[in-house]
Amino acid sequence: MIEVKNIDKSFGEVQILHDINFTFQEGKTNIIIGQSGSGKSVLAKCIVGLHKPENGQILYNGRDLISMGKREKKEIRKEIGMLFQGGALFDSLTVEENVMFPLTMFTKMSKKEMRERVKFCLDRVNILDKNKLFPSEISGGMQKRVAIARAIVMKPKYLFCDEPNSGLDPRTSILIDDLIKDLTEEYKMTTVVITHDMNSVLEIGENIMFIYKGKNHWTGDKESILTTQNKEVTDFVYSSKFMRMYREKIMK
Amino acid sequence: MLIFVVNKIIINRIEYFYHIGRYAEMLGQMFSRPEKFSVYWNKLMEEIYQLGIKSFGIVVLMSAFMGMVIVIQTATAIDSPLIPAYTVGFTTKQSIILEFSPTIISLILAGKVGSNIASELGSMRVTEQIDALEIMGVNSRNFLITPKILGAVLIFPLLIVFSMLFGFLGGWFACVSTELVTVEKYKYGIVAFNNNDMMYLTYALSKTAVFAFIMTSISAYQGYYVKGGSLEVGKASTRAVVYSSVLILLFNYLITQLVLI
């Protein structure tokens, strides 16, 4: 479980996050949604420790990330897997080497054990046959799957996914969403997905936070997000023609 | 108007201090204990290959042609019968050891290696690869920058030794092909008057190590802190080459004044 308490974050004079409070539930797919520029990614980067908030606490099972020492922070980071928007795979390494990288850096596993673990992870994301290729030689969807394999190779307790579907076609997006949901259940991880894609919210969202102008504006689940009367949430949820048609249908 | 100009100057000065502070912080964080020594050792070997061995061709080419030109220019410039012919060899040796190989080749390497480092790290920054390393718990400065600096400081002096060697060979070729000076006189000029040669060689290789540190750390700084997209990566590469070159020239003067006077 990750608890975020009273988080404020500014860049220069501009305050991006205002007093954010939320609990990301263990073993569930938690979703942060909001418009572009609302502060979703900044919040995620604060939670994983890439940005330091001015105020507040970020508690990983009660351990505060902000006040902990370097060594403790390093240890907690080994429990975190992250899927970046663009995949963030290392260009100079093959698919197999990318997934093996965290094992090489932080474990004392033998080469054979590492290969077996990498094979298992690549097989789990259904991309085992591309293990000898470089990231530039595979498609965007495949890169995302490799990035997921790299994120889970250390069996993390927490998985963060920043816009996992950006730049992907609807079919591949659903595959990625399903994979995130299945892995969350399989590894009993606390998963946090940052997205503005309503399809993802409806596919995998179990615990949702809606950020509006840097504030936690609304919280709920995927059923309640469709029925809420909160104006900003409904404006966001029903901004596409498809969703408006869907609303008209359920209203009838 | 005046207030605007004064404000601009003050802000620029503050920015200089900010960059110096951040550069010092980067260097401080670079030299921490590596996560896994074997991984860093492999990375160091890879950087020695990428930065040093892959630059061997251009260094040899530049040095050989420069050696040829120095011989021809010196030989044609000496028109007094009172100056002995072996002066050509002696002048070539002094030019190559003291200035051409350590400084000019370092400036060329600053262009090649500096832009390479800045664009590599800059691309890694804008594609979030550096963030990915940090989230895994890897000290990215230590992992990405330290092997580059160490690799360059170790291999560049060796490259400069080869540069000197090929500079002399280039000069020898010019003697053979133009017959402006006999090979024997040229050789005599190189081997004679060798009292200070070891001191000059030490001076040349030491300053090469300093230049290697300057070009790799400045370029790494420019690339590591890139913000934005590919356009900024390009600008960072240009800044890396310009700042490295200017600092190499400045330190060349300072070291020369300190050591040779």
Image (cartoon, rainbow, N blue to C red):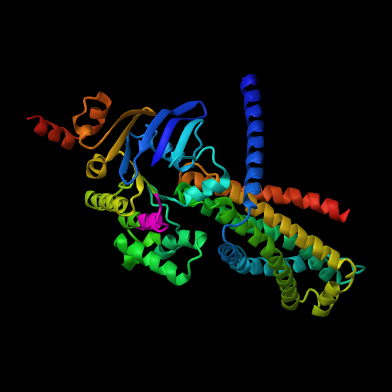
For the question of whether residue A199 can be seen, the reply is: yes
Q: Check the image and report above or below for B45 versus A79.
A: below
Question: Of all residues shown, which one is farthest toward the left?
Answer: A252
Where residue B176 sits: x, y (%)?
74, 78
For the question of whether residue B77 can be seen, the reply is: no
Q: Residue at x 66, y 40 (%)?
A: B20
Q: How many labels sit on residues?
A: 0
Q: Check the image and report above or below for B244 versus A210.
A: below
Q: Could you tell whether B63 is left or right of A83 in the image?
A: right
Q: Could you tell whether B159 is left or right of B87 in the image?
A: left
Quadrant the C terminus of chain A occupies: top left
Residue A154, picture quadrant: bottom left
Q: Could you tell whether A38 is left or right of A48 in the image?
A: left
Q: Residue at x 81, y 63 (%)?
A: B202
Q: Residue at x 35, y 46 (%)?
A: A191
Q: Check the image and report above or below for B14 versus B40.
A: above
Magenta stretch, residue numbers: A146-157
Q: Residue at x 30, y 47 (%)?
A: A165
